[in-house]
Image: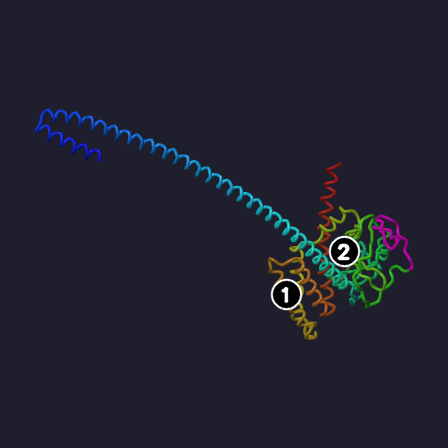
């Protein structure tokens, strides 16, 4: 607006100056003053506007600061609230965790009690099952001690021999495996190396058939509890022979060919030697091979022709099996021994001539054992000589 006014004024001055020079000069002067006044007004207005703007800016800054402070205050409040809520949630979670843990422990105890109760129930049933009586039969196997037959009677249960402690003590009383038997306060104590006095009730024959049940009556060997399977039969305890041998220090073996239980006593070195002289698979195969050759001679014999069909069949099967075992590289010692036994028994049933051959076969095995034993003793003597 000031520029328009100034333009008009200047136009008027120029018009006047064109017609009247003096007046024009005066007018110009007046115009200059007016212009200066207007400029002052403009400047003043601009200054005022600048000051107003500055005040507005300052006020805006103050407002912004105020808003910022409020925002920060609100943010702090929100942060504190969130923190409080988080802490409360954490405490609640911890409390829930403890509650769950307590419930879990309680459940665990409950499950354990149930498991223990179930275990006890099963144990009781097992004990009841063990206590159930079963049919047992007297053993008809011979028993030898260091090669000599002894009088001892017991029961054969599940292909294992069971004997009374006092009967066994009576048999071993003159050996280095002797032991004493004492009974006090319902506990039997066995003293290794102790003397035993034979009673009138010892080594008596037993009933051919009876009822027996597993028992766990306490028996001590010195201060140690005897770990042995035992059956109570007619109010007497019968213990598994191999368990007694392990606990009391005597050897237990079995000769299947003669159905004889072999008891051995002596020093450990002697037992090792005795074990060492047992024939190997190769040696037994050699004996079986020779027995096969001898048995083959019966194929056209009068004894075989006159024999019953069952005897013939038994002989032929035993001979065929023996030949197969001789050729079998993977045959075990037990297989060879069983085959030798079967072949000997089958030829034995053919008559007197077979008896001679059976003795020859047995003698052959014995000869192998003796030769092996002589070798072991020779080596032992040489070692003794070296140490002197």
Q: Height in image: 98 above or below 61?
A: below
Residue at 87% x, 62% y: name it: 204
How far is the residue under mark 1 from the one under mark 2?
Answer: 32 Å
Q: Is residue 387 found inside the magenta-colored segment of the image?
A: no
Tell me the magenta residue range. Answer: 177-200
Viewer-proximal residue among 240 and 24? 24
**Picture disc at residue 77:** none
Report which residue position mark 1 lands on.
321
Q: Pinpoint residue 74: horizontal percent, then vertical percent.
A: 48, 41
Q: Pinpoint residue 39: horizontal percent, then vertical percent.
A: 23, 29
Residue at 82% x, 55% y: name it: 218
Q: Residue 130's quadrant in the figure?
A: bottom right
**Picture disc at residue 242:** 2
Determine the secondary structure under disc 1: helix
Q: Height in image: 128 above or below 24?
A: below
Determine the secondary structure under disc 2: helix
Q: Pinpoint residue 101: horizontal percent, then vertical percent.
A: 64, 50
């Amino acid at each position: 607006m000031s520029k328009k006014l100034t333009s008009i004024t200047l136009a008027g001055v120029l018009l006047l100056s064109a017609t009247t020079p003096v007046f024009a000069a005066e007018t110009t002067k007046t115009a200059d003053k007016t212009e200066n006044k207007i400029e002052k007004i403009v400047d003043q207005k601009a200054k005022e506007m600048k000051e107003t703007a500055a005040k507005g800016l300052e006020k805006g800054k103050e407002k912004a600061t105020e808003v910022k402070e409020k925002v920060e205050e609100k943010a702090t409040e929100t942060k504190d609230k969130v923190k409080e809520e988080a802490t409360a949630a954490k405490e609640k979670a911890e409390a829930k965790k403890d509650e769950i843990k307590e419930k879990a422990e309680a459940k665990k105890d409950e499950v354990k009690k149930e498991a223990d109760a179930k275990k006890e129930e099963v144990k009781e049933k097992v004990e009841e099952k063990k206590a159930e009586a079963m049919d047992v039969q007297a053993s008809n196997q011979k028993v030898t001690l260091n090669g000599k037959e002894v009088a001892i009677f017991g029961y054969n249960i599940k292909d294992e021999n069971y004997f009374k402690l006092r009967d066994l003590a009576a048999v071993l009383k003159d050996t280095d495996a002797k032991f004493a038997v004492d009974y006090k306060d319902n506990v039997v104590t066995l003293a290794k190396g102790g003397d035993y006095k034979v009673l009138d009730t010892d080594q008596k024959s037993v009933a051919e058939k009876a009822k027996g049940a597993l028992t766990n009556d306490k028996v001590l060997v010195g201060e140690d509890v005897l770990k042995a399977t035992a059956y109570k039969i007619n109010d007497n305890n019968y213990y598994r022979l191999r368990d007694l041998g392990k606990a009391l220090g005597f050897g237990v073996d079995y000769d299947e060919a003669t159905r004889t239980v072999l008891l051995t006593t002596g020093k450990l070195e002697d037992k090792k030697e005795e074990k060492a002289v047992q024939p190997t698979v190769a040696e037994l195969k050699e004996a079986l091979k020779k027995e096969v050759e001898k048995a083959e001679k019966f194929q056209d014999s009068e004894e075989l022709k006159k024999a019953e069909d069952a005897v013939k069949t038994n002989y032929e099967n035993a001979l065929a099996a023996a030949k197969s075992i001789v050729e079998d590289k993977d045959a075990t010692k037990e297989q060879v021994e069983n085959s030798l036994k079967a072949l000997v028994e089958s030829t034995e049933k053919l008559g007197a001539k077979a008896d001679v051959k059976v003795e020859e076969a047995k003698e052959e095995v014995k000869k192998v054992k003796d030769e092996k034993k002589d070798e072991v003793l020779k080596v032992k003597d040489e070692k003794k000589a070296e140490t002197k």
